[in-house]
Amino acid sequence: MASTVSDNDAVLSANLEFYRAFTTRDMGAMSALWAEEVPVLCTHPGWTPLSGRDEVLRSWRNILANPEAPHVACHDDRAVLYGDMAIVLCEEELDTGHLTVTNIFHREGGRWRMVHHQASQIVMRSRER
């Protein structure tokens, strides 16, 4: 089993691959990131929750095919690992504002694959930031 440091780096790399697929509108790369062996979930900002790989990937196919889809940049990403599960908290920067994001990954076939993505608008920041 890989060390915690390399697992942390691998999870953050998988998270960046998700944003690279989003930015480049690469549906093949997006599909390859999502888990196949465990259930997946996704809640896009303002949407009702989506459940199941087919439904989640259909939503991404529609988003990535839309020329009006937002351009997004990820920053302040940090990972917390729980064995074969990892949670990445980060922010998405869009032309219209910032979103706070939870991306959850599961180790599947030796790779970190996404099982959950949820993005929500940031309404107010704490003074500590």
Image: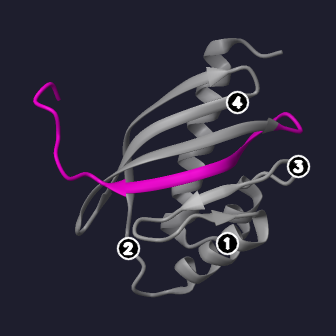
Residue that sits furthest to the front in the current view: 48
User: Magenta part of the protein: which range?
Assistant: 108-129
Dot 4 lies on which element?
A: strand
Q: Amino acid at mark 3?
A: Glu
Residue 15: image x %, image y %? 56, 44
Residue under the image location 37 percent in, 56 percent down: 120
The residue wearing badge 2 is 70
User: Residue 9, how many percent across, how many down?
Assistant: 59, 27
Mark 3 and mark 4 lie on one chain; the one further toward the N terminus is 3
Which one is in front, 97 or 18? Answer: 97
User: What residue is shown with label 1?
Assistant: 27
Mark 2 to mark 4: distance in Å? 29 Å
Report, in whole angstroms, how far the alpha carbon at label 1 lies from the one at label 2: 15 Å
Q: Secondary structure at mark 1?
A: helix
- Asked whether the residues under the numbered discs 2 and 4 touch, taking CB atoms below 8 Å apart as contact, a structural biologist would say no
State the separation of the CA atoms marked 3 and 1: 19 Å
Residue 95 located left or right of residue 68: left
N-terminal of the two: label 3 or label 1? Answer: 1
Identify the residue shown where x is 76% and y is 63%. 52
Instruction: Residue under label 3, please give it.
Output: 37
Query: Which residue does the image show at 55% across and 77% down from the upper left?
Result: 64
Circle 4: residue type: Met
Q: Is residue 128 left or right of residue 91?
A: left
Q: Which residue is mark 4?
A: 85
Marked residue nearer the N-terminal end (1 or 2): 1
Given this view, does label 3 or label 2 mark the residue nearer the observer? Answer: 3
Secondary structure state at the residue bearing disc 3 = loop
Where disc 2 sits, the SS reads loop
Q: Quadrant of the N terminus?
A: top right
Q: Nearer the viewer, mark 2 or mark 4?
A: 4
Distance from label 3 to label 2 (Cα)? Answer: 30 Å
Q: CA distance from mark 3 to mark 4?
A: 13 Å
